[in-house]
């Protein structure tokens, strides 16, 4: 399942990743707020959202590095 999720994320465009990142950050904020105010139904959701955000940011930074290398080699 993990490899499928990574492959799915890598297949997304930068715009799609941006939207997914925003949604994940919003969801993490709500979960943290809910954790402070009341008991969470599923505390593991916090960790899942954090990991999703980290994966998205990693993919975005890898793409930036690839673009920088391509532009450096292209000149």
Image: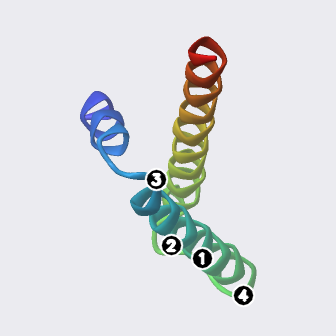
Q: Nearer the viewer, residue 34 or 16?
A: 16
User: What label sits on residue 46 in the rendered view?
Assistant: none
Are circles 2 and 1 on residues that touch, CB within 8 Å? yes
N-terminal-most mark, 4 or 2: 2
N-terminal-most mark, 4 or 3: 3
- The alpha-carbon separation of the residues under discs 2 and 1 comes to 5 Å
SS of the residue under disc 1:
helix
Q: Residue furthest front?
A: 75
Label 3 sits on residue: 14
N-terminal-most mark, 3 or 1: 3
Q: Residue furthest top?
A: 73
How busy is the neighbourhood of tag 2: few (under 14 within 10 Å), some, or many (20 plus)? some
Q: Nearer the viewer, residue 55 or 60?
A: 60
Q: Is residue 2 above or below residue 30?
A: above
N-terminal-most mark, 3 or 2: 3
- The alpha-carbon separation of the residues under discs 4 and 2 comes to 21 Å
């Amino acid at each position: 399942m993990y490899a499928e999720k990574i492959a799915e994320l890598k297949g997304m465009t930068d715009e799609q990743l941006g939207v997914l990142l925003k949604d994940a950050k919003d969801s993490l904020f709500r979960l943290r707020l809910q954790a402070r105010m009341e008991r969470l139904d599923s505390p593991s959701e916090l960790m899942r959202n954090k990991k999703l955000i980290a994966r998205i940011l990693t993919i975005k930074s890898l793409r930036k590095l690839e673009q920088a290398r391509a532009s450096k080699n292209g000149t």
